[in-house]
Image: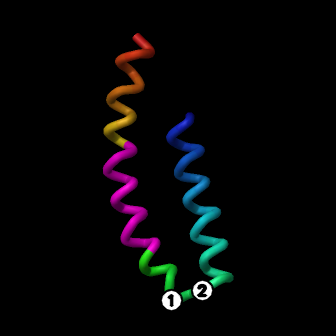
Amino acid sequence: MGNGEWGMGNGEWGMGKNKLARSQLPITNYQLPITNYQLPITNAQCPLPHA
């Protein structure tokens, strides 16, 4: 659930940047996938402490 909130937060960031600067949107798009890779890593650690 926490990870899901992070993803939603990123969406808000993208929306905010979209209104601020559209040229910066693609830059954030590149950083988004990077976070996507770290998200699954946290998912693997989540079940560990959960168990």
Residue at the image point whose x is 56% and y is 87% from the top: 22
Q: Which residues are magenta?
A: 28-39
Q: Is residue 22 left or right of residue 38?
A: right
Residue at the image point whose x is 41% and y is 25% from the top: 46
Q: Percent x, y for residue 40?
A: 34, 41
Q: Which residue is mark 1?
A: 23
Q: Which mark is residue 21?
A: 2
Label 1 SS:
loop
Give the vertical position of 5 relative to 48 (above or below). below
- As shown in the figure, which amino acid type bears the numbered disc 1? Ser
**Counting other residues with Cα less than 10 Å from the Cα at mark 1, is it few (<14), some (14-19), or many (20 or more)?**
few
* 33 falls in the magenta region: yes
> Outermost residue, bottom direction?
23
Count of number-bearing discs: 2
* 37 falls in the magenta region: yes
Residue at the image point whose x is 50% and y is 40% from the top: 3
Q: Is residue 28 left or right of residue 30?
A: right
Q: Percent x, y for residue 11?
A: 58, 62
**Counting other residues with Cα less than 10 Å from the Cα at mark 2, is it few (<14), some (14-19), or many (20 or more)?**
few
User: Can you tell which quarter of the image residue 15 is in?
Assistant: bottom right
Give the vertical position of 42 relative to 29 (above or below). above
Label 2 SS:
loop
The N terminus, quarter of image: top right
Q: Percent x, y for residue 42?
A: 38, 35
Q: Look at the magenta stretch and give its main secondary structure.
A: helix
The CA distance from mark 2 to mark 1 is 5 Å
Contact, mark 2 vs mark 1 (Cβ under 8 Å): yes
